[in-house]
């Protein structure tokens, strides 16, 4: 929901039989990696679908697609049904509860915000989805004009435009993305779990042996995206944040990042392996619901109802999973709250210069611990533009 990472270089296509050692695996599967981390999410991989905030490496996509080209090419139209509309029709009481919960979230309406402080040229904050959907790339009314007048552009990681630099930094820490202790995912699974995982990956044209050395959240990030998004990214389409960063460089604007990709990887990797394994298995079991969640989340984003996304994800998670509360508090603290604080702290001195266009994942914005409230505490006046 993620990065889900794309369009970087012309990677070779590999299978899983010629991997020799951990560094070989790194080169084949994740060179370069562009990984931002999930935003405010539930405690399973629906988080990654909801926020689309894990960015894939072009090589990872090309590698996995090369294992099943027919599957990848069979469906380039996203489709998917509207889960909110379905709930409204089939369970009005549940839908009313969803609306009530969303309405109680501070700053839950709006993806485009104006940032002001006395004596400074105005700045702007755009909540993004890290996807290649042309409707998302179009941005809300007024955002393009605000971007054009900005002198500085802030994204989550400015390394998104320098894949070689990012890859070099991350290759120094292969343990963040690969199992580097001689083990594979199979060593952490019960027989029944391994069977489920192998079957779920096989349905997507991915042999378990080909990805067994990857950290489970990397594999989950891949299978959490519908074929249409993977196809666009494999073809080189830029997701919104990357396009904004690339345009900033082309136009001679100053480009700033709030985190390094290694920091983002460390945040995801800090959560227990079993947590990610369970999330991966549950994602595979969702089947077509993945496409439905993508479609619904995108529609909510485009209608600027970002406060509705988390309640919806929790609702779907509770319906599909018996372990909806396991690990959620740690996940939210490490992946959302801690990162929001880092982003706000690092953004403040840049925003204090004025004329900034800041773009981060939309689900970093709402809530009492969201970026909008944190920046208000730093003395900025922030108001929704649309």
Image (cartoon, helix red, strand yellow):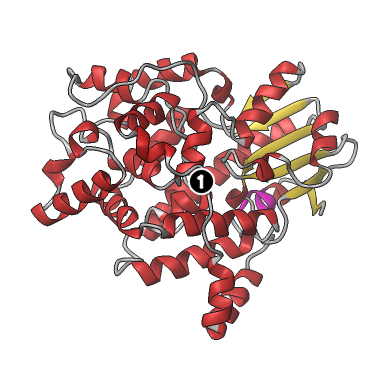
* Point 39% across, 27% down: residue: 62
Name the one closer to the observer, 304 or 288.
Answer: 288
Q: Quick check: 268 above or below 195?
A: above
Q: Is residue 373 magenta?
A: yes
Judging by the rendered image, the residue that carries numbered circle 1 is: 52
Residue 160: quarter of image: top right
Q: Is residue 95 magenta?
A: no
Q: Position of residue 137 (x, y in %)?
A: 68, 39
Name the one closer to the observer, 201 or 361.
Answer: 201
**Can residue 5 be seen in this snapshot?**
no
Q: Position of residue 358 (x, y in %)?
A: 70, 36
Name the one closer to the observer, 239 or 346.
Answer: 239
Residue range in magenta is: 370-374
Going by the image, does 47 lie left or right of 302?
left
User: Which structural element holds mark 1?
Assistant: loop
Going by the image, does 160 lie left or right of 124?
left
């Amino acid at each position: 929901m993620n990065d889900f990472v794309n369009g970087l270089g012309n990677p070779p296509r590999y299978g899983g039989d010629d991997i020799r050692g951990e560094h070989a695996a790194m080169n084949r599967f994740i060179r370069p990696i562009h990984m931002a981390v999930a935003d405010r999410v539930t405690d399973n991989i629906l988080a990654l679908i909801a926020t689309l905030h894990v960015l894939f490496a072009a090589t990872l996509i090309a590698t996995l697609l090369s294992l099943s080209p027919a599957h990848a090419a069979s469906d380039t139209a996203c489709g998917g049904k509207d889960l909110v509309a379905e709930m409204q029709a089939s369970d009005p009481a549940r839908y009313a509860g969803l609306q009530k919960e969303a309405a109680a979230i501070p700053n839950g309406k709006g993806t485009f915000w104006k940032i002001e402080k006395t004596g400074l040229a105005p700045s702007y904050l755009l909540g993004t989805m890290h996807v290649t959907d042309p409707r998302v790339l179009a941005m809300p009314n007024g955002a393009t004009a605000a971007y054009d007048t900005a002198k500085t552009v802030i994204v989550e990681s400015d390394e998104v435009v320098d894949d070689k630099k990012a890859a070099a930094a991350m290759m120094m820490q292969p343990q963040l993305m690969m199992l580097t202790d001689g083990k594979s995912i199979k060593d952490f699974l019960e027989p029944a779990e391994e069977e489920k995982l192998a079957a779920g990956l096989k349905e997507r044209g991915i042999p378990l042996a080909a990805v067994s050395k990857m950290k489970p959240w990397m594999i989950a990030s891949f299978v959490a995206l519908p074929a249409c998004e993977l196809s666009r990214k494999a073809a080189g389409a830029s997701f919104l944040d990357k396009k904004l960063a690339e345009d900033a460089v082309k136009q001679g604007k100053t480009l700033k990042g709030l985190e390094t990709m290694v920091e983002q990887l460390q945040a995801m990797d800090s959560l227990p392996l079993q947590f990610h394994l369970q999330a991966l298995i549950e994602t595979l079991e969702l089947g077509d619901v993945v496409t439905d969640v993508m479609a619904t989340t995108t529609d909510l984003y485009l209608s600027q109802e970002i406060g509705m996304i988390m309640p919806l994800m929790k609702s779907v998670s509770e319906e599909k999973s018996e372990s909806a509360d396991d690990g959620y508090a740690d996940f939210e603290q490490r992946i959302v709250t801690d990162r929001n604080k880092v982003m706000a702290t690092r953004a403040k001195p840049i925003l204090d210069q004025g004329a900034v266009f800041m773009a981060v994942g939309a689900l970093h914005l709402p809530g009492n611990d969201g970026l909008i409230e944190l920046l208000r505490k730093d003395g900025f006046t922030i108001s929704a533009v649309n």
